[in-house]
Amino acid sequence: MKRALRVLRFCLLSVAALVAVAGALFGWFLYSPAAEVPQLSGTVAKGAMEVGGLQRTYRTYLPKGLPGGAPLLLVMHGSGQNSADIRAETGYGFERLADQHGFAVVYPDAYTFDWNDCSTIGDFSVQGRPVDDVGFLDALAGKLAAETGADPGRVFATGVSSGGFMSIRLALEAPSRFRAVAAVSANVHVPENFKCKPAGAGTSVMIMNGTKDPLVPFNGGESSLLGLFFKGGTVRSAGQSAQYFADINGIAGEPAAQQIPAVGVAGANVEQRAWRNGGRAEVELVTVQGGGHGMPQSAWRRPRLLGPSPMAPDGPALVWSFFARQRS
């Protein structure tokens, strides 16, 4: 009897130890400290509109004293997130920039777990009909441009992960609405995993990816986490994705390249490659050497599960710098 009790006690202690270790590893890989909310001049408001028979929601940030004719920026969240999450995940960087440079920001919410991007993988239907995210984002941009007096010729979109893939779809299917997009942690899907219907040239495109991204492979391949979660099918490499948009926009020749420093990850640096020919559209590839999944910035460290998290360069500032030079 005593021996049985000793064995039982040993088993219980072993299970408790395993649970403790598992909990510690879980916290180590997934914990991320909350970003500090900065003091801002304007206010954040919630909004809703009906598009395609669905009630769609969003948050807006309008700086105090926003002038008429200001640019409008859409910022899209990743898988399983919402508009509040992407505000924090970007370190409230776009709101800080909006205060400095005078533009309106809107954070739309996806209707399903992911945005309905160009991939053929995944179910984006509601009551048997595919969710029209392009229609929603196009209508939202038009609505807010009218309400805020923003310049309809300087509407921009960016997003991280699923939001980055949706940015790519907007560049392809709504070039008349979106002057430029910046896709972060996202590549163009390969032809056999591609349902988008490009509507023409004209949208400038930035692609910003980390070389150690565990979800979206920098060199192309299967997009997933650990081969089990967030499966998005096969994508092109970051370089091929940038070249794809250079070809669409008729920009020939080799891109110009420059290096900028990164901090927070040993050996990390950033390369910018730009395709330009003096025309309306341009393409830029930002390669974060040693960077993981997400937008680099100093206000928020990503969970370790998503790979290395450089604290520089300032991702939102790079994105806005790209948008700021795009004329109406």
Image: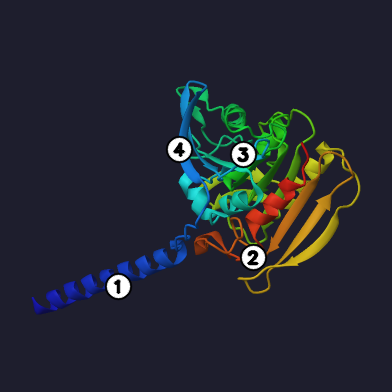
Q: Where is 20 relative to 101, above or below?
A: below
Q: Is residue 232 visible?
A: no
Label 1: which secondary element? helix
Circle number at residue 46: 4
Query: Earlier along the polypeptide chain: callout 1 or callout 2?
Result: 1
> What is the distance, in whole Å, between disc 2 and disc 4 at their CAs?
31 Å
Q: Is residue 235 left or right of residue 32?
A: right
Residue that label 1 marks: 17
Query: Earlier along the polypeptide chain: callout 2 or callout 4?
Result: 4
Name the mark nearer the viewer: 2 or 4.
Answer: 4
Query: Earlier along the polypeptide chain: callout 3 or callout 2?
Result: 3
Label 2 crowd bin: few (<14), some (14–19), many (20+), radius 10 Å: many
Of the residues shown, which amino acid type is indicated by label 3? Met
Q: Is residue 300 left or right of residue 237?
A: left
Q: Where is 76 relative to 310, above or below?
A: above
Label 3: which secondary element? helix
